[in-house]
Amino acid sequence: MSVFRLVLKEIAHRKLNFLLAGIAVAAAVTLFVSILTMGQASEREARRLMRDMGFNLRIIPKDTDMEDFWAKDFAEREMPEEYVRRLASDPALAVNHLVATLQKKVTWRDRQVLLTGILPEVSPPGKPESPMSFAIKEGTVYVGFELARALGLKQGDMIDILGKQFTVAKCLPETGSKDDIRIYGHLHDIQKILGKEGKVNEIKAIHCLCFGADLGTLRSRLAQSFPDTQVTELKSIALARAETTEMVEKYVAFLMPAVLLVCAAWIGVLAMMNVRERRQEVGILRALGFGSGKIASLFLCKAVIIGLIGAGLGFALGTALALRFGPGIFKVTAATMVPAYGLLWWSVAIAPLLAAIASFLPTVVAVTQDPAVTLMEE
């Protein structure tokens, strides 16, 4: 009788042991798949939430007076608008979400307002990103909360700004910051009314999200390619972003081995129990001339079958759990949660191997038993 048929008969005879071992493998794969599927969503969620904290780099003209810059929160000097596209196309800089702006404090309707032109966000080639900032159509403006409230402005109103007519596309909600007295327009519109065509006074961006990103290296590369600029980093945002991303990655890296070890121990205990139950059976097989290799193949073949069945069930259950509960946990990136079919092949490869490794020690015990001693016990 072939090894495979013997294994099938043994499975049919000891259904409970097979069921419990299958549950162990399925549980391991279920946790493996669900944790990795939601872990990927968790990393995306953390990156998105950290990204939404704001830009962590501010690139400004080199000859900017920094005391004046921090007092006004914008530079009085300008640099070419084309820099934003050159920065985005330079792979050595590793910056994303670049937004060029031109800001100036002006008097409008007897009020001091911050007139701000924004160019639609520019991303590096081949890296389509969801925009962090709003894009404003030419001929329209967004009006800050305090200005809209004090002047009774509402969406759809026509207003004159320094001799040019604009439509109020949106009245912004209260922020409790300088944005409440700000008027946003398309960069090219603001350049024209300020007489600053082709000029910007700041480029905002996000630097690498990895922990310990080297600002010094970035400054050195900027100095080589853009010698008339300087860069400052908002360290609190950069550090919070990097530490949160690192924490999520470490958590997933710790959890997965722990789950696999517990389930492997469970399978090993069940395999040892199976060996003890089959002592007399193994003794008879040895007495009939079955060698150690064939005896070992009986136990390992059963482990592989358990692993394959557990892999299929575990992948289905793990994916179902991730898709059922993941979107409720990770609301910002819920739409990106889809079955990770690549994990199916990993499950099919790893689960039988895990079951075989967990069964190895009990298998060694089985093949080293003395059949004479075993049959005397019977």
Image (spheres, grey):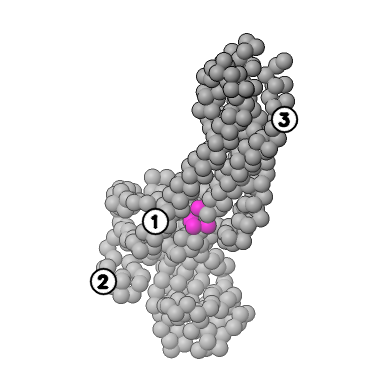
Give the number of the disc on residue 67. Answer: 2
Q: Nearer the viewer, mark 1 or mark 2?
A: 1
Look at the numbered discs 3 and 2 and tell me whether their residues touch, using CB distance below 8 Å.
no
The part of the image, by quadrant, that contains residue 330 is bottom right
Q: Badge 2: how crowded within 10 Å, few (<14), some, or many (20+)?
A: few
Residue 327: x %, y % from top left: 62, 58
Relative height, residue 10 to residue 77 (above, below): above
How many other residues sit within 10 Å of disc 1, few (<14), some (14-19) or many (≥20)? some
Position of 58 relative to 85 (above/below) = below
Q: Which residue is mark 3?
A: 13
On the image, the x and y values in percent for residue 173 come to: 53, 78
Magenta span: chief secondary structure: helix
Which label belongs to residue 243?
1
Residue at (64%, 52%) from the top-left corner? Answer: 321
Magenta residues, start to end: 43-47
Q: Is residue 44 magenta?
A: yes
